[in-house]
């Protein structure tokens, strides 16, 4: 993609997703992710109804009347976007590829964080960590993240969720809001998921294509694995084959949902044909 075309695409993504974050998600984001704790702000005279545990006894003794400590919510947060760029994300049968939807969702979350003056970082992964951008503030930083989401070419096409989560645990020392965006076509990542969910506020966002849920009747067709490159001839007329295909998808879906729920992490799923706006709003409101 040449520079002019890339900038045009970045601008288009910014206009669409920033409008969503400004008018739709700003308040929901703020309400959902409130801050890590309380910091001391000032002391003031005791008023009827104040918690006696907040009395500052040193100041009270000095002025011979009760004063209480006032605390403010620590608002600055770190949002970390962990985005799957493996081969299966370049799949799409109708309007958009999965990676395009992941990019839009990530950009919307990033601008929501920007509106709240939070830091935003990016981790792109396949079977290895492909790119890590440390969390920072500012519009130019967000635009850099969007550029990488749009044009980054991974070295590998396979997926290793554990590797991404393990790397994340090593580089993020303080608690962060972590959104992992993927189709979650992987297994064996429960241990690293559990560790990450204990340390951070973790949410999985799973994006899939409708064709992945149900195999259409197309006769005997060649099907290529987007991650391994392996080609197999599949008889899509066979009811048994179609049932096995659907069963495999449903099993992966259940595994993903149960793993995240079991380990105290949030999760949502969205088809490329669904409105991710409604899905995100529903998720945020359910958490408040």
Image: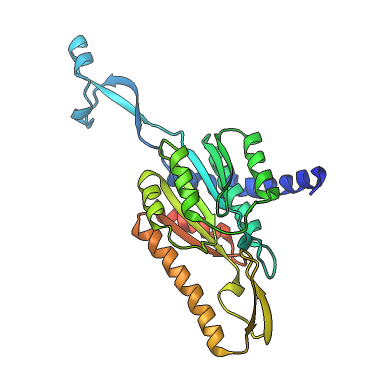
Q: Nearer the viewer, residue 78 or 125?
A: 125
Q: Nearer the viewer, residue 25 or 181?
A: 181
- Expressed as whole percent of the image width and height from the top left, the position of residue 38 reads 34, 32
Task: Decide if residue 5 is on the left or right side of residue 118.
Answer: right
Q: How is the image coloured?
A: rainbow
- Expressed as whole percent of the image width and height from the top left, the position of residue 245 reads 54, 79
Task: Decide if residue 101 is on the left or right side of residue 288.
Answer: right
Count of marks placed on residues = 0
- Expressed as whole percent of the image width and height from the top left, the position of residue 9 reads 75, 49
Q: Name the quadrant containing residue 100.
A: bottom right
Vertical order, 140 against 108 (above or below) = above
Vertical order, 95 against 233 (above or below) = above
Q: Residue at x 80, y 43 (%)?
A: 3
Q: Name the quadrant containing residue 71.
A: top left
Task: Decide if residue 110 is on the left or right side of residue 259.
Answer: right
Task: Decide if residue 90 is on the left or right side of residue 181.
Answer: right
Q: Nearer the viewer, residue 66 or 223?
A: 223
- Expressed as whole percent of the image width and height from the top left, the position of residue 84 reads 57, 54
Q: Residue at x 51, y 82 (%)?
A: 244
Q: Residue at x 46, y 57 (%)?
A: 283
Q: Residue at x 73, y 44 (%)?
A: 11
């Amino acid at each position: 993609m040449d520079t002019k075309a890339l900038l045009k695409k970045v601008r288009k993504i910014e206009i669409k997703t920033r409008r969503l974050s400004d008018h739709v998600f700003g308040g929901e984001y703020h309400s959902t992710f409130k801050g890590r704790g309380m910091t001391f702000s000032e002391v003031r005279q005791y008023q009827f109804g104040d918690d006696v545990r907040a009395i500052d006894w040193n100041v009270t003794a000095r002025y011979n009347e009760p004063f209480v400590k006032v605390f403010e919510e620590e608002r600055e947060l770190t949002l970390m976007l962990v985005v799957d760029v493996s081969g299966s994300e370049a799949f799409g049968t109708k309007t958009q590829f999965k990676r395009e939807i992941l990019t839009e969702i990530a950009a919307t979350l990033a601008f929501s964080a920007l509106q709240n003056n939070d830091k935003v970082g990016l981790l792109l992964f396949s079977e290895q960590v492909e790119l890590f951008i440390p969390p920072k503030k500012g519009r130019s930083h967000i635009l850099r993240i969007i550029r990488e989401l749009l044009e980054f070419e991974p070295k590998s096409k396979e997926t290793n969720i554990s590797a991404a989560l393990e790397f994340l645990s090593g580089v993020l020392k303080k608690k962060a809001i972590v959104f992992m965006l993927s189709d979650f076509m992987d297994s064996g990542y429960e241990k690293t998921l559990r560790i990450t969910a204990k340390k951070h506020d973790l949410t999985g966002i799973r994006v899939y294509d409708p064709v992945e849920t149900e195999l259409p009747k197309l006769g005997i067709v060649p099907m290529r694995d987007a991650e391994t490159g392996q080609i197999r001839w599949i008889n899509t007329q066979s009811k048994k084959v179609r049932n096995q295909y659907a069963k495999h998808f449903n099993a992966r879906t259940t595994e993903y949902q149960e793993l995240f729920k079991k380990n105290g992490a949030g999760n949502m799923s969205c088809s490329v044909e669904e409105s991710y706006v409604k899905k995100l709003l529903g998720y945020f409101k359910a958490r408040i």
